Image (cartoon, grey):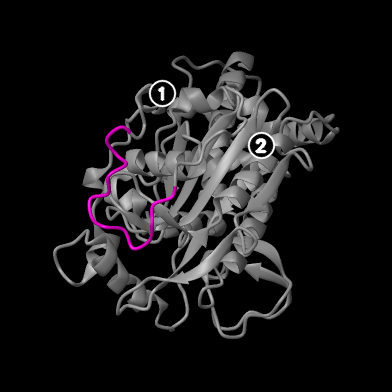
Amino acid sequence: MEKERATYRGYLLGVLMILGILFIGVGLQGCQNGESTIENETKMVSEVANFSPSPDASSISTQTSSVENDSSSPSEMSDQPLWADRLTPSIPPATPIPPPLGDLALEDDILVWILLGSDTEPPFAGQTQAIHLLFINPRFSKASLVSIPGDLYVYIPGHTMQRLNIAYSIGGIETLRMTLAYNFGVVPDRFVLAHPGDFKWLVDDLNTVEVTVFYPIPQACGGIRAGLIQMDGTLALCYASYRNGMDEIDRMRRQQQLLRVIFRNMTQDGNLIQLPVFFASYQGWVKTDFSLPELMGYIPLALRLADPDRVGYYMIGWDQISIWEVPGYSQAKVFLPDQEKIKALLQGAINDIMIPSPLTDQVQTLEAQLTAAYGATATAYHLITPSPTTTPTPTGTQEIPAMWITPSAIATITPPGYP
């Protein structure tokens, strides 16, 4: 019995990282305001990138993921000359192509993950309106999350200068990795891509979240007042994805706020006991190149990262970018990066996780809460089954042995609707 309990607990904790990553890699839907930004964007994509033969470039946001190569190995790419045949753009760029960013001081044992949120439901690729680089130092149990605006105007190797948020839809994760390597000097080891419905469903599965709104947003989401707000999945998605014109920086700030709240909710009070059901429900919808055995190896690290102040939050904001209007009739506006300032920001995020600091007792508390929740759930799963042979008892009834249900014996029921 104890062995079966241990097996069940190992399975439970084994999915900790994939849901932790899901919280960060939220699929944020672009519910922006009714200004002409979206219309200009589609015109610009057709005019500058020319990725579709039709003047209507909206097909870029509805491409299927058939071009994606999720099995591409970052180690294979890093062994090749990255820019040998990719420095020549396929069409003339609207602005000169900057040199590749390099010389970041990044040790080999630092994990680099890219966390993405699509604005489109599967099977379409869409645009990645949520882009987060995650640097993890397993030795010191520290991490840095760097949020990147999707409208950042970068060089997509082998294509041309274009918004970062369409790199994935052009060529899948391999093209995005090459784009990040060229413009940010890092090649992600692993990736996760979530969709809007994934995020909404997760918040609803958590029975809403409490978010402190510092500034009211009367013009969006039916009007959001300042103060402590109880948000369901629909409201949380709108709060995290609403953008007023070009103010993508404020949107990233609200995204990071929600991510902290969700991560705290999931790691406290034994709520991780729900992860086996979550894992089965989201499997096949969230795109990733993680394997479950690999994620299980990160269980101790994930619990330590839940300790206070182990994760630092950064963003490429107004100090590192400037607004620029793309030449042509579209009048579309994008963010031009300042390479030196972006490099300084990334290096600062990396340097912060290289400073050791002691853990608090919070890790032991979270483990105890999860263990207690497991014990209560295991009792609920106690199943009474008839014995092959009857055993007389003093009262004349039959004594029936008990059996603990293991995860392999539990049927997973997917609720109706999305996914």
Instruction: Determine the residue positioned at 25% across, 69% down.
Output: 47
Marks 1,2: beta carbons within 8 A: no
Q: Residues within 10 Å of mark 1 (few under 14, many from 20)?
A: few
Taking the image as shown, residue 58 lies to the left or right of residue 352, namely: left
Q: Which residues are magenta?
A: 84-98
Taking the image as shown, residue 287 lies to the left or right of residue 240, namely: left
The residue wearing badge 1 is 75
The residue wearing badge 2 is 350
Of residue 318 and residue 207, the one placed in the foreground of this image is 318
Q: Toward which corner of the image does residue 322 lie, by quadrant?
A: bottom right
Q: In what quadrant of the picture does the N terminus appear?
A: top right
User: Regarding mark 2 in the picture, which secondary structure is present there?
Assistant: helix
Identify the amino acid type marked 2.
Ile
First in sequence, mark 1 or 2: give its number: 1
Taking the image as shown, residue 335 lies to the left or right of residue 306, namely: left
Residue furthest to the front in view is: 96
Residue 53 visible? The answer is: yes
Residue 387: x %, y % from top left: 48, 19
Instruction: Determine the residue positioned at 62% across, 64% down.
Output: 318
Residue 192 visible? The answer is: no
Taking the image as shown, residue 130 lies to the left or right of residue 51, namely: right
Q: Residue 258, relative to residue 193: is it above or below?
A: below
Q: Residue 125, relative to residue 374: is it above or below?
A: below
Of residue 240 and residue 247, the one placed in the foreground of this image is 247
Residue 271, numbered circle? none
User: Regarding mark 1 in the picture, which secondary structure is present there?
Assistant: helix
Of residue 42 and residue 401, the one placed in the foreground of this image is 42
Instruction: Determine the residue positioned at 44% across, 31% down.
Output: 290
